[in-house]
Amino acid sequence: MIKKLKIWAKSLKRQVFILYLATKDKRTPWVAKVIAVCVVAYAFSPIDLIPDFIPILGYLDDVIIVPLGIMLAIKLIPEPIISDCKVKAGEMMKNGKPKNWFVGSLIILVWIVLVVWLSTVAYKFFK
């Protein structure tokens, strides 16, 4: 069971690298590019929307959101582009994933806004 999960995780990682490379390809349709950019930015973000230390929910985004986004983006990208990117992705995976601090910053901003809003609501409620 664990071996299957490791294989699945490695496959997802490879697909994210493929999407990353496809976003840079001029032949990629713009709709596919937008979806792929969102998926890649989230996958490469050093911060998750739902932190992993939150039981069950913390890993839900990694197990549901990222794979669904990958599947959608790959379906929208023509096969010749995917084939070209697969070759490059194998080489790129050896160097490790790039970090996307911009998306990480946006996620931190979402959490700050949420905390401020909840604090305001709680203050008004208990006032």
Image (cartoon, rainbow, N blue to C red):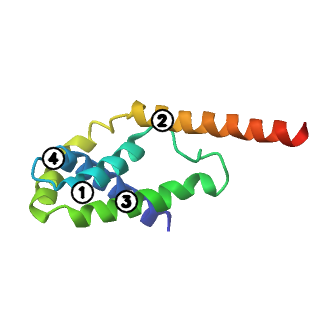
Distance in Å between CA atoms under marks 3 and 1: 13 Å
Are the residues flagged by discs 1 and 2 in contact, CB closer than 8 Å? no
Which sits earlier in the primary sequence, circle 1 or circle 4?
Answer: 1
Under mark 1, the amino acid is Val
Estimate the x, y position of residue 29 in percent, counting from the top left. Answer: 16, 56
Mark 4, secondary structure of its residue: helix
Residue 23, image x and y in percent? Answer: 21, 47
Residue 8 seen in this snapshot:
no
Whether residues under marks 4 and 2 lie with C-beta atoms below 8 angstroms apart, the answer is no
- The answer for how far apart the CA atoms under marks 4 and 2 are is 29 Å
Kind of residue at badge 2: Leu
Q: Considering only order in the chain, which callout, 1 or 3, is on the residue closer to the N terminus?
A: 1
Using the numbered discs, state the Cα–Cα distance from disc 1 to disc 2 in whole angstroms. Answer: 22 Å
Q: Using the image, tell me which numbered label, if any, was put on residue 88.
A: 4
Q: Dot 1 corresponds to which residue?
A: 31
CB contact under 8 Å: marks 3 and 1: no
* Up-down relation of residue 54 to residue 96 (above or below): below
Which residue carries the number 3 mark?
A: 69
Give percent across and percent down for residue 31. 24, 57
Residue 4, image quadrant:
bottom left
